Amino acid sequence: MIFDPLVFCTLKETKDLQFSTPIPLEGEGLWIGVLSSGQCALADEEAPQLAGAGSLLLGAPPLRLVPAEPCHLAAVLLGGQAAAAFAEGLAGPMFAAGASCPGAAELVAQLVASPSSRRASALGYQLLCESARADAAAPSYPPLVTMAIAAMREHYAGLYGVEELSESLGVSKSHLVRVFKAAVGVPPGQYLTGVRIEAAKQLLCHREYPLEVVASLCGFSGANYLCRVFKKATGQSPTAWRSAAAGVPELPELPQERELYV
C-alpha cells in the first residue's frame, strides 16, 4: 500500500481574521489558531475565561469566539486521522499557553500564507505534533502585562523599544521589565523581538518582498540587522528560511557592503 499523507492530515481551510464581534468557526476536523492580538473567550466553556495575545486555540468545531476587544486570529482547520485522534483526546475546546509550543505560531503562519503548498499536509502534521505539548490553559497575565503584549503586537513596526513602551503605559521601564518577566518568563525587549521575527516570517512567505522592505515593515533598522537577529533566533538566515518555507532551493545571498546597527 502506498503511503498517503492526506489520510493522516490534510489542510481543509484557513482563516486570517480581524474581529470585534463574536464569530463562529465551523466545519469538520480540528481548528488550531493563534491569537496574535486582543482578548477573547470561547462561548461554549462552562466558565469562559479571557485568553490574551499569544494564546493557542484548539478545538473541534463548531466554535464561537467572543472578543472583549478587537482581536486578530490566524487559524487552520485540519482533517484526517491524526487530526481526528487529536480532537478526541481534548477534554473540549480551549485556549492554551502558546509559550509551551512556540513553533505552533510559525507553522500556522506558513499554512495561512501558503494553503495550496505541496507541503501543507506535512506542515499540518508538524503542527499537530507541536500543539500536543500545549498547556491545558492559557496564562492569566496581570493587566499591565496584557496591555504591554497588546501594544507590542499592534505597534511592533514603529515601537522604538521598551523605554517608549513603558512611557506609553504610564510606568517606569524597570517596573515594566520586572512585572513582565515575572509573568511571561522573558523581558519585554526579548518578547518584542520575537513578535518582530514572527511578523518577518509572515512577510517572508511573500517572495516579492526584499529583505530591506521586510526589515522596515517589522521594525528592524535594516536588512543586515534583521539577518543577524533572525539567524540567532532561528538558526537560519531569512533567505534560507524563506526558501525552506517555499520548498524551493535556496538562492545565495549577495554580500552586503556595510552593516547597520540599531
Image (cartoon, grey):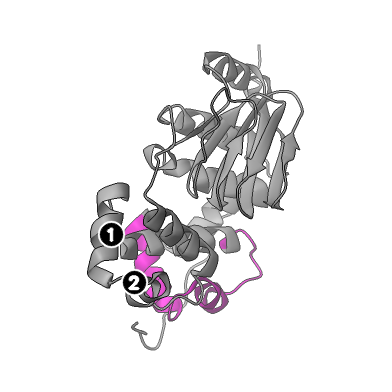
Disc 2 secondary structure class: helix
**Crowd class of label 1 (few under 14; some 14 to 19; many from 20; radius 10 Å):** some
- For the C terminus, the quadrant is bottom left
Kindly identify the residue that appears in the image at 47 percent across and 48 percent down: 54
Q: Which residue lies furthest to the right in this view?
A: 27
Left or right: residue 111 compared with residue 240: right
Determine which of the numbered discs, if any, sits on residue 108 in the image.
Answer: none
Q: Position of residue 63 (x, y in %)?
A: 68, 30
Q: Where is residue 172 in the image (x, y as percent from the top left)?
A: 28, 72
**Crowd class of label 2 (few under 14; some 14 to 19; many from 20; radius 10 Å):** many
Check contact, mark 1 vs mark 2: CB within 8 A: yes
Identified by mark 1, the residue type is: Pro
Residue wearing tag 2: 162
> Over which residues does the magenta segment extend?
204-233
- For the N terminus, the quadrant is top right
Q: Which of marks 1 and 2 is nearer the N terminus?
A: 2
Kindly identify the residue that appears in the image at 49 percent across and 47 percent down: 52
Q: Does the magenta stretch include residue 139?
A: no
Residue wearing tag 1: 187
Q: Which of 2 and 103 is in front in this view?
A: 103
Magenta: main secondary structure equals: helix
Identified by mark 2, the residue type is: Val
Kindly identify the residue that appears in the image at 66 percent across and 52 percent down: 113
Q: Where is residue 46 in the image (x, y as percent from the top left)?
A: 57, 22
- 166 to 131, vertically: above or below: below
Left or right: residue 242 compared with residue 197: right
Kindly identify the residue that appears in the image at 48 percent across and 64 percent down: 151
Q: Nearer the viewer, residue 185 or 169?
A: 169
